[in-house]
Structure formats: structure tokens, C-alpha cells
Amino acid sequence: MQVFVIIPAAGLGTRMAQPGVAGHAPKQFLELGGQPILVRALNAFLHVSSIHHIYVAIRQSEIERVEAQLREHDVLTRVTVVEGGDTRQESVRNALKILPAADDDIVLVHDAVRPMIDPATIERTIEAVVRHQAAIVAVPAVDTIKHVERTADGAIITSTIPRERVVLAQTPQGFRCHILRRAVEEADADGFIGTDEASLAERIGIDVAVVLGSARNFKITQPGDLALAEFYLKQS
Ligand code: C5P
């Protein structure tokens, strides 16, 4: 059994844009503690010995620049760059197309913009996939979660979701390869676009297990998030 990783890194990172500042780099290429965010995420996976190869999906116009960056940081030996798509799902699908994985091999998908992932959590995710066929990292909800209806006058609460039944999905999200391939194929055929891979598996009836993640493994989304990640780095 081999383990492969797909890192979709073809997002534009528009929420990272600073008002009035032109030409920001997509967030996955910004530096965190002297290393590009993407390289930091890659290094966590490269520290897990059972991982065979990593596929990173990059926007066509960025491929040359990113390959040079990965070469400079000496991480290209177990990493292949593939062209990303217009949605995260398309980026994952493009990588899946060239992945030389057998049906029972494991595929982990990880957001490029979660650089604080640690090898121990990756290993626990792989173990959970071996046991359950599909598993994702998630954290319990600490806030009370509301369902809302968006109206012209703003959001109106329609109900409260019992917090003890809610977890917040992170990545990595891991699957036996045949499950992920079928989940993506069926979503594409139905015109369904999900914001994570688990949602594609859930809709075809797969039970997806949960591995406990941590607040550190957050998604760098907004400008202040880099400072928070720097803080976590200094703590470790
Ligand atoms: O936009 P969001 O925060 O959900 O992005 C999650 C991950 O998906 C990021 O690593 C981003 O680069 C990636 N992505 C992608 N292709 C897209 C959009 C997002 O690979 N078209």
C-alpha cells in the first residue's frame, strides 16, 4: 500500500488582498518564518516516511515560479507540479488524473494554506484511513453555530445547530484511492462542487471518520492570519 498526497495550491487568495495594495502574491506563496507557506506544508508531509509522492496543483501562470521556488528549497525530489483548475475540486481532479495510485492506495488532500500541519496528525490520518477507508482532520466547535437565511436586510437566524454534533473540517482529508476517484467522478457528473473532498464522499454514502486536529492547523485566509501563524511558530 502506498500513500500519495495532493496539495491544491491554485487559489487566487483574494481574501488576503490588503485594501489599496495592488499585486499581492497568492497567500500560499507568502513567507512564514523564512519559508514560503506552501514549502512549509510540503515539508510536514515529506517528514512522514510512508508518503510516496506529493502532487501540487498550481495555476498555469505560476508553475515556472513555483517550480523554481521548490527547487531552491530542495523539495522537488518527491514532489510533482500539475496544472490547477478554476475550482479546488478541478485542481484535485487534475492531480488525480496523473496519480499512479492503485485502488487500495491512500490519497491525502491537504490545503496549501494550512502550513502548521504536523507529521503526527498526518500519521494519525493515514492510520484512520487504513481503519475506516475515509477520514478527515477536524476540530470540535467551540462557538454556538447558527443556520441563517440571507436576506436583503442581512442574515436572519433560522435555527441553532447543537454544538456537540458539529466539528469544523480541516485537512488532510484521506481516502482509499478508489473512493476519492468515484466521489470526484460522481460529483462532476452531477454538477456538484464541494468545498472539501469529504463532502463529495458523504454524498455517495461513504462514512468518513474524524481525526482530532488542532487550532494551530488553521487556514491562512486573511491578512492578520500570518501574524497568528508566526506566533504559533515561535511557541513551538
Ligand atoms: O479558497 P480556499 O481557501 O477554499 O482554498 C483551499 C485550497 O484550495 C488552497 O490551498 C487553494 O490554493 C486551493 N485552490 C485550488 N484551486 C482553486 C481554488 C483553490 O487549488 N481553483
Image (cartoon, rainbow, N blue to C red):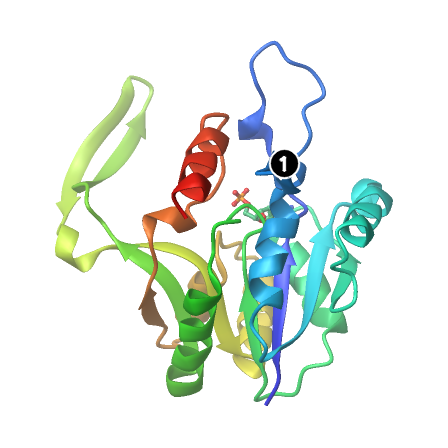
Q: Position of residue 155 (x, y in %)?
A: 27, 26
Q: Position of residue 159 (x, y in %)?
A: 15, 41
Identify which residue is drawn at 29% across, 55% down.
139
Q: Amino acid at mark 1?
A: Glu
Against 228, is 97 above or below? below
- Residue 37 located left or right of residue 155: right
Q: Report the residue marked by disc 1.
A: 31
Q: Position of residue 28 (x, y in %)?
A: 62, 41
- Say which quarter of the image contains residue 48: bottom right
Identify which residue is drawn at 50% across, 62% down.
197
Report whether the residue tagged 1 is closer than 8 Å to ligand 1. no
- Residue 42 located left or right of residue 120: right
- Residue 90 located left or right of residue 157: right
Q: Residue furthest top?
A: 20
- Say which quarter of the image contains residue 46: bottom right
Against 106, is 195 above or below? above
| Residue sitting nearer the eye, 202 or 77 | 77
